[in-house]
Image (spheres, coloured by chain):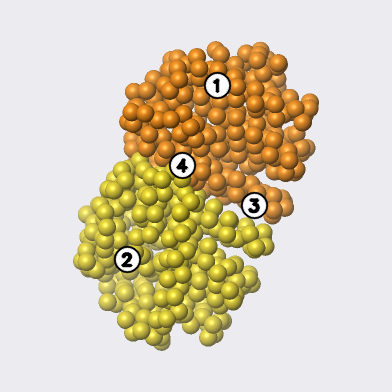
Chain colours: A yellow, B orange
Amino acid sequence: MSFAMDSTQVEEAFPAPLEDFRRQVNEKLRSSVDAVEPPRLREAMAYSLLADGKRIRPTLCLLTYEMFGHDVSIALPTACGLEMLHTASLIHDDLPAMDDDDFRRGSPSNHRVFGEGMALLAGDALLAYALEFILRNSGSLHPERQLGVMAKLIEVVGPSGLSGGQALDLDCQGRDEVDPWTVEEMHIKKTGALIEASVVTGAILGGASQDEIARLTTYARNLGLAYQIVDDILDETSSFQEVGKEVGQDRAAGKWTYPRLVGVEKARERVRTLITRAVEELDAFGERASMLRWAAGVVSGRAAA
Amino acid sequence: MSFAMDSTQVEEAFPAPLEDFRRQVNEKLRSSVDAVEPPRLREAMAYSLLADGKRIRPTLCLLTYEMFGHDVSIALPTACGLEMLHTASLIHDDLPAMDDDDFRRGSPSNHRVFGEGMALLAGDALLAYALEFILRNSGSLHPERQLGVMAKLIEVVGPSGLSGGQALDLDCQGRDEVDPWTVEEMHIKKTGALIEASVVTGAILGGASQDEIARLTTYARNLGLAYQIVDDILDETSSFQEVGKEVGQDRAAGKWTYPRLVGVEKARERVRTLITRAVEELDAFGERASMLRWAAGVVSGRAAA
């Protein structure tokens, strides 16, 4: 199966279109906050938003859009908005009151540079600006489609997404025991929801049918959960150089993760199961879904590395 | 002029409909977060949201809606969303990294009860949930109208609203000198934007014309700025018992306010000018705008108290 290839192999197999997506996203992001006032807030927003990142969420959105639509520029504002939401959540997660991380993407975290107050506001501002930026650049879209995208992204930020997942994480820290379902719910909200929204907004913008959206939702939910488990595996097995942030901190902070709950090997097994389920949903799309299959392969490959 | 009456007189003149609005808003708010998960996040959100408040923003929204529409229940979800946004900003403002306030609405502030991390997340969650709650309860509205409301509220949270105003505030603290225009911009973003949105969303939901929305925007912008100046005057002249939070802290924190910049008397004069401008915009609406005139009178009355 193609998704069992390791990440280097698959990256070599599909280099050009993804590099092009990443370039387009980075270019659009660079100009996205130019007009933001006041200046100090703009600097804080831009510092984290324009830091080197893999742009996984925008790429998933564009890849999914391309299965249905032709003009990728239609989905580009939403792709950028997804990266803004992701960045906002990273800024807040790194704050001393949360994970207290000093580094992110290989550089000092936002509050280390701009102070806690400004970092808090930069996160708030990016949460809203993501939606503002999408709306402002989606004037040509049918209002129903714009509302569909808004509703999905708003849900991602709220209690059933990022903030709910983080709250569960915070609430479980220091507990002696947590059941696997709670850990899974936490991961689905904390990471899965935004990955899911990346795929689903791409599908909505491309005009996918309800049935297609349902299949892609299942694909993305499984992929997103697998992605978070891989992240936690890497936190236990990698170095600072490899991931660009401090590692081994989850366990030190008393956080509950899959590897802590069941061990690294069982966690890898869970990743394989989730990726298989994700890829099964793509059968109905045939060749059109080859890039989404590839994305699942990359996650699978990182877990095995 | 009616708006020169003091607040007791005008409150006596229009008691019933406002008390009824407040009751309807409180009732809807009480059930609004019942289904939120996880439980600890719900508790933190509900703690601040359901604290006793004047519900000024929801009331302004409903009053404006009533000038155009008939069925107030149409505007009630948006009215509640406005209160959620306001509450979210209060929770974040009170955090140690921001204003470091221990009390709010007469009770311990959110982070004093739930911890800084959970308070941060309760704020994030309420920002998003405000929009989620409105969308979920506005299914019967035309998509264009829903989008108009969303766009206005999203702008309020972003750099041109709450987070931008707070960033400017933070940036000016400790400076030796700040010009009046910067202080005014800060107030317009920090307080004016949400007051403006309360009125404008009411107008959008009621089906007001572009010209009517423009007039009401000017009314609300002036009212909102006046409201913030009055708040700052009261911070210098009132007691804890009167306002339900610690007072005299703005000056102690090196914050820039109108009273600090020009003194309490000149600040009161500015309030009068702003209220006069606000009320002028209501002429075109005749008797329909009597409650908005009354609202302006209350702000005017608080300044004179």
| Kind of residue indicated by mark 3 | Leu
Q: Is mark 1 on a helix, strand or loop?
A: helix
Which numbered circle lies on residue B244? none
Residue B263 appears left or right of B270: left
Real-space CA distance between mark 3 and mark 1, rounded to the nearest whole angstrom: 35 Å
Element carrying mark 2: helix
Q: What's the amino acid at mark 1?
A: Arg
Q: Can you identify the residue that label 1 sits on?
A: B270
Of the two numbered discs 3 and 4 in the rendering, the one whose residue sits closer to the viewer: 4
Residue B168 position (above or below residue A17): above
Badge 2 density bin: few <14, some 14–19, many ≥20, Cα 10 Å: some
Q: What residue type is labelled 2?
A: Asp
Q: Mark 4 points at which residue?
A: B164
Q: Label 1 to label 2, Cα distance in Å?
A: 56 Å
Would you say the residues marked 3 and 2 are in contact, meaning their CB atoms lie under 8 Å apart? no
Q: Of helix, strand and loop, which one carries label 4?
A: helix
Relative image position of residue B256 (x, y in whole percent): 41, 28
* Cα gap from disc 3 to disc 2, whole angstroms: 37 Å
User: Label 3: how many residues lie within 10 Å, few (<14), some (14-19) or many (20+)?
Assistant: some
Closest to the observer, B200 or B53: B200
Residue neighbourhood size for the residue with mark 1, other residues' Cα within 10 Å, grouped as few (<14), some (14–19), many (≥20): some
Alpha carbons under labels 4 and 2: distance apart: 33 Å
Residue A231's label in the rendered image is 2
Q: Which residue lies at the image location 32% right of the left edge and 46% below the top edge?
A: A114
Residue designated by label 3: B147
